Amino acid sequence: MKNKVLLSLAAAIIFLGGGYGLYVWLGSMQKDPPKRTAKPQKMAVKTQNANPSTIEAEIITFGRVESEQPVDIVAEVSGKIRENVHLQVGQSVRKGQVLFTLGKETFELGLQAQKSNFMREIAMILPDMKIDYSSRYQDWSNYFANLEVEKPLPKLPSYQSEKEKTFLATKGILTSYYNLKAQEATLSKYVITAPFSGSITEVYLQNGSVAPPNGKVLRLAQNSQLELKVPVDTRDVHWLKTGTEVNVATEDDSQKWIGKIARIGDIVNPATQSLDVYVKIQKGENPVYAGMYLRATMQGGTIKDAIEVPRRAVFNDNEVYTVKNDSILHLQTVQIKKSNKETLIISGINEGEKVVTEPLINAYNEMIVKVLEEEKSSQTSKTLSVK
């Protein structure tokens, strides 16, 4: 029994060993398949055929219409505001129209009391005038007769000698007269009138409020003198000059006007790094209102021997790729003449060169590439949009 087990085990080992040997022998007879060499893949690039030409530098920017001469109406004296026109934004007023008054009763009564004292001073000098200045008595007597506490003070009779002048000065007549005239000038400040025809654009104090001295009450804007205020990047202001014609329009181009650059600001906005340009809008078929949001298209100078490319074509501030011999990348430095919203106007590219118009990853100088269909070269300047 034991011998049978050993014989079975030996037969199994011989069978497995023979199978493995046959497998190795058959495997050695099979040839390895030939190895294929991978062909290098060329990077595909989009290009633009360069046709340098003279390009107009056009600037487009947006801004709001505002009054050319807005004025803050100030209460120079203190008093309770009593409106004569409704103090609200949009209210139209006429030149010379009373806007509001300030409570003046106390001040007016004090002025009348001072005029009464002045009348007494004039009455006291009349006897001396009749004796010492008889030729002048009638003039001063008529002056006294015309004095009324509720009316403006009439002009003093002119003195005709140094002696008469000295007499009036020593009696305090001249001092009292000019003090009263100053008080009358102050009284006139309690009535505020419109300096021009226009509309109220801001209201700082309402009817019934007490205005402090020199406190702003409202802002008045002239409707007849409007201008468009637009920001322009400091890098592009040098293209503009006063008097240049400007095309003004609404965002949807439904209304259009012609304007001219009236002035260019010289204070830079620190947040936007732009300067304000003011455009005087000429009257047209469509009315213009303060607060309208409009687009201004301004023609600047001309740029010679330049092309316009997408902003993404330029990297490292001033470098582009061109394609030589239809297959070799060439790194080239250019000069950026003007930046637009989506494009750049550059020079330094020769006629017929192919400029790569898209950013390339892992590209390098003299790299072999495949040129795709060329993009059409732009011949006119696109626009700079400042918002």
Image (cartoon, helix red, strand yellow):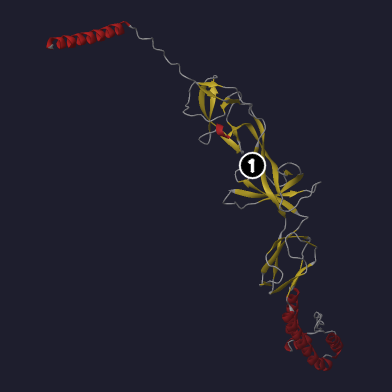
Q: Which of 199 and 121 lies nearest the eye of the viewer?
A: 199
Q: Hey, which residue is sitting farthest front in the picture?
A: 1
- Residue 309 quadrant: top right
Secondary element at tag 1: strand
Amino acid type, residue under disc 1 in the picture: Ser
Q: Is residue 7 above or below residue 99?
A: above
Q: Which of 93 and 72 lies nearest the eye of the viewer?
A: 93
Quarter of the image containing the C terminus? top right
- For the image shown, how many numbered marks are present on the structure? 1
Q: Hey, which residue is sitting farthest left in the picture?
A: 2
Counting from the top left corner in percent of width and height, residue 20 is at 25, 10
Counting from the top left corner in percent of width and height, residue 346 is at 59, 33
Q: Which of 166 and 225 lies nearest the eye of the viewer?
A: 225
Left or right: 340 in relation to 196: left
Q: Which of 251 and 147 lies nearest the eye of the viewer?
A: 251
Name the residue at 77% across, 56% down. 223
Counting from the top left corner in percent of width and height, residue 208 is at 71, 72
Q: Is residue 336 above or below residue 35?
A: below
Name the residue at 26% across, 8% down. 19
Counting from the top left corner in percent of width and height, residue 21 is at 25, 8
Q: Work out whether residue 163 can be spotted.
A: no
Q: Is residue 220 above or below residue 361?
A: below
Name the residue at 84% across, 92% down. 130
Number of residues whose C-alpha sits closer than 10 Å to that of mark 1, classed few (under 14), some (14–19) or many (20 or more): many
Q: Work out whether residue 161 can be spotted.
A: yes
Name the residue at 12% across, 12% down. 2
Quarter of the image containing the N terminus? top left
Left or right: 212 in relation to 362: right
**Residue where numbered disc 1 is placed:** 385
- Residue 47 quadrant: top right
